[in-house]
Amino acid sequence: MAKDKNNKFKQDRKLWYRGLKNILKFRYKEPIFIYLGDKPNQNGIILSNHVGTDAPMSLEIYADFPIRMWGTHEMNSGLIKMYKYQSRVYYHEKKGWNLHLARLFCLLASPLTNLFYKGLKLISTYKDQRLRKTIKESITALNNGENIVIFPEVSDEGYQDILKGFYKGFALLSEICLKHGNDPLIYTSYFKLKDKVYIFDKPILFSELKKIAPTKEKMGKYLVDRCNKLGQMDLKELNI
């Protein structure tokens, strides 16, 4: 098990965006990163719970390995689409805010969020044939030595401490990578918001995962169970 708080590494982002992230450190405090196996290096696929903006922002600001995140295309398609998605889906449906309050809040929040996402180098995800664009961009990023971060939890009832399921997009990406001769390492992780601890499970090669869980449904079940076990770990046993 490795514990790490190294923050010397810098993501491949524009200078103005790095400055913005320094400001955001006042809101998002640095977590302790715990690795039960090897730390992500290059060409891996990282799966994590979402915890609203806290898990993505903690990774973007403090992870000391190269990452590109998947994110719904509404958050990466301009201010108007972002406003509609943020107010109705994110704040109202997922976080349980009153819809009118969410709309008022997003009049201020959405322009700031839109600015942030312009620098994030987000890989947009889709629910139709445009998903091929997501896969293509992800494979390019992996070939460039970056790790793909996916937040696959089923969150139609909001973000929960105990995840009820994983969407299967990660399995599709991994399968295509394998067909192209790249057997990606899969890293399951869990961000414990209250404790400010980010735990990464021991990675597993996708080819080995297929032996344990041969279908996409079984993969999702196996990995969401692993993720929930990380969330339920006693930090005293990890010397935290």
Image (cartoon, grey):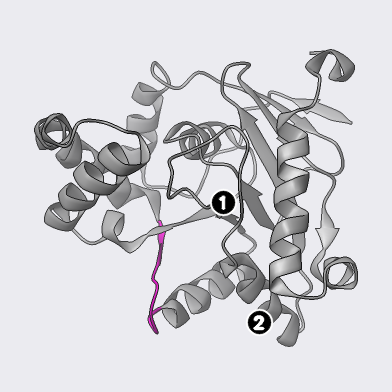
- Indicate the position of residue 1 as horizontal and vertical percent values: 89, 31
Q: Is residue 20 left or right of residue 190?
A: left
Does residue 8 sit above or below 69 in this rendering? above
Secondary structure under tag 1 reads strand
- Horizontal and vertical percent position of residue 76: 29, 58
Q: Residue at x 40, y 56 (%)?
A: 122
Q: Is residue 129 magenta?
A: yes
Magenta stretch: helix, strand or loop mostly: loop
Which amino acid, mark 2? Answer: Ile
Observer-side mark, 1 or 2, equals 2
**Which residue is located at x 12 percent, y 55 percent?**
80
User: What residue is disc 2 on?
Assistant: 176
Q: Position of residue 81 (x, y in %)?
A: 17, 57
Mark 1 — residue?
67
> Which span is picked out in magenta?
122-130
Image quarter of the C terminus: top right
Instruction: Based on the picture, tell me whether residue 26 belongs to the magenta stretch.
Output: no
Task: Compare marks 1 and 2 and give the one earlier in the sequence.
Answer: 1
* Residue 33 in sight from this viewpoint: yes
